[in-house]
Image: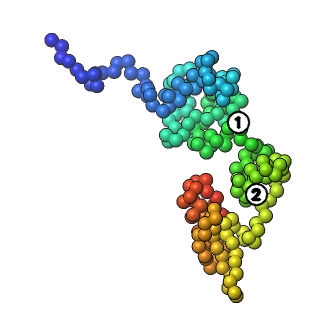
Amino acid sequence: MAKWVPKTNRPRNNLRHGLSKTKIWVTWINIKRRCLNPTEKEKKYYGKKTLLDPRWLKFENFFEDMGQPPTQEHSIDRIDNNLGYCKKNCRWADVFQQNQNRRCVIRYKTKTLKEWAEIIGVGIGALYRRYYFKGWSLKRTCETPYKNKTNTKHRGVQKRQYKNSIYWGAILKGKWIGTFKSEREAAIAYNKASKELFGQYGWQNQI
């Protein structure tokens, strides 16, 4: 009489890649759904004629070209949203990269407003105010330098005078960080507070 073997211990003779239901496998399934399903509701976000490389109809080829995502927070991203899914046009991107590569992101000379904000040394909110509320053109919005009203070289740093002494203060989002003997110390304190509050997206002064 044959001995019963628990299901978890049975040999998997039909095992192909062992990656079913993993993140990369689910990603591949979703790509095929977006491209091949004629009734897919998400087509309005990915384009009506989103093409799929015939090579990627087989999961093993997709896995060979893309490999595992660096982290669980990374997802597949098309470098050019007007092109389809293929090795040359796809990458693993984090949330920030995905947001910067959306169709609705405003660009000027191939750069986003976030990138222009870093170039001219102004917050992204200031560029939005210039463009949406003041009605500035994209050229004026992105190329007009930031006028530092505090007469210092660093953001969030203010030069103040009390009687005959001069000191520097650091402030972030209306919250006073502290008083310092030099502008450099105040800028370092601002950088630290900005990183704690906003993480990798916080503004960092060049020291």
Q: Residue at x 67, y 70 (%)?
A: 157
Q: Secondary structure at mark 2?
A: helix
Q: Quadrant of the N terminus?
A: top left
Give how far across and how far down residue 173 sits, in percent. 63, 62
Q: Nearer the viewer, mark 1 or mark 2?
A: 1
Residue 103, labelled with which disc? 1
Quadrant of the snapshot with the C terminus = bottom right
Q: Left or right: where does residue 73 sit relative to residue 130?
A: left
Do the residues bearing badges 1 and 2 touch, measured as CB atoms within 8 Å? no
Query: Which quadrant of the figure has residue 190?
Result: bottom right
Examine the rendered structure and indicate whether residue 110 appears above or below residue 60. below
Give the residue furthest to the top.
Answer: 1
Q: Position of residue 204 (x, y in %)?
A: 63, 61
Q: Residues within 10 Å of mark 2 (few under 14, many from 20)?
A: some
Which residue is drawn at the image coordinates 50% and 28% (left, top)? 26
Q: Disc 1 to disc 2, how far (Cα)?
A: 24 Å
Q: Position of residue 186 (x, y in %)?
A: 62, 72
Q: Which mark is residue 120?
A: 2
